[in-house]
Image (cartoon, rainbow, N blue to C red):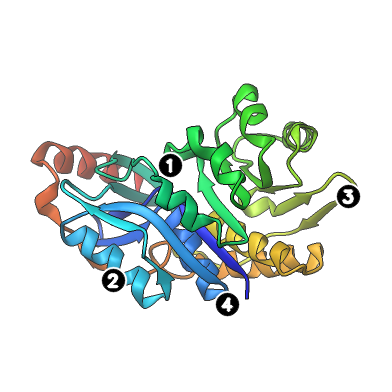
Amino acid sequence: MVKIAMMGDNVVDCYLARGEMFPGGNCLNVSVYVSRFGGQSAYVGAIGKDRAGDLIHAALASERVDVTRLRRLEGSTAYCLIGHRNADRIFLDFDLGVSMFTPTQEDLNFLSSFQAVHIGQSSGLDPWVAAVSSKSLLSYDFSTRREPEHRREIGRYCYLASVSGAGLDENELAAIASELLACGSKWVLVTRGRAGAVLHSDSVSYRTPARLVEPVDTLGAGDTFIARTLFGLLKEEAPQDILDHAAEAAAATCQYYGAIGHASAIDIGKMTPEILRGARHVQDEKTA
């Protein structure tokens, strides 16, 4: 059994045009996908004692994700307001709520029973990356963060380093991958949306094209790719097979709303009238 823990960000993604909110966030999404792929999954994070927190807790439990180290705090669960243009998501506004937390020694000890731990750059947990990597293999999502000094600092601890290729050409992405490998990362995954993905090691690179589907919502596709790649590496599957399976899974994620589904009516009460008016104005301009 592949055992992977995720520690870090969560959010409810609020689709104002649909009046629905969905559990999300890089680390939370990866925890659910790992479970769906057949792994033993756990999520370490913080949510509020509100209806959005109830939704996240219920979704994780129904997906068989271990929530032993999920704390519920006073304050609001993080949220993000989402718009869409041709199924591609547009981030309109957000509030981090209580999602930024300080890991305890008990959290770190809990991670030592897993083969790997996944953390995303948006989780605010960089100061604990070294400690986490001493407990288990580290998967880290750099997303679109580009500073070379950040790559050098974090990359040396990574078993799997994931990078979003948005806005960069192939040569730029190859240079980033080479830098991460030189720092000490064992594997580097570069996702490029409709341009497919590349998995790099010191000796060889593997490629897969994107699977052509008519997308409903692309939110969560990159997280799906990360989860399936990490899962496959730990299962010691052939790298090319891993990429192909990941591409199929990411395409499937684009076929429904929300990163993991589990829709619920938006908790409008937690958003100020100013935020709602501003977001609706932007959404009217930017979404089809």
Nearer to the camera, 172 or 153: 153
Q: Please tell me whether mark 3 or mark 4 is closer to you in this view.
A: 4
Percent coordinates x, y for residue 276 in the rendering? 16, 43
Query: What separation in Å lies between label 4 and label 1 (alpha carbons)?
Result: 25 Å
| Residue at x 32% of width, y 41% of height | 92
Q: Around disc 3, counting alpha carbons within 10 Å, would you say few (fewer than 14), some (14 to 19), or many (20 or more)?
A: few
- Report the Cα–Cα distance between label 3 and label 4: 28 Å
Relative height, residue 105 to residue 127 (above, below): below
Task: Give how far apart the Cα atoms at labels 4 and 2 are.
Answer: 19 Å
Q: Amino acid at mark 4?
A: Gly
Q: Earlier in the sequence, mark 2 or mark 1?
A: 2
Task: Say whether marks 4 and 2 touch (CB < 8 Å).
Answer: no
Nearer the camera: disc 3 or disc 2? 2
**Given contact means CB atoms under 8 Å apart, are the residues at marks 2 and 1 in contact?**
no
Number of numbered markers: 4
Residue plotted at (63% across, 28% down): 153
Relative horizontal placement of residue 175, taking residue 56 as reference (left or right)? right
Residue 184: quarter of image: top right
Residue placed under numbered mark 2 in the picture: 58
Residue 123's disc is: 1
**Residue type at the position of mark 3:** Val
Q: Amino acid at mark 2?
A: Ala
Residue 38, numbered circle = 4
Quadrant including the N terminus: bottom right
Is residue 101 visible from the viewing direction of this image? yes
The residue carrying pointer 4 sits among few (fewer than 14), some (14 to 19) or many (20 or more) residues within 10 Å by Cα, namely few
Could you say which disc has been placed on residue 157 in the image? none
User: Callout 1: 10 Å neighbours few (<14), some, many (20+)?
Assistant: many
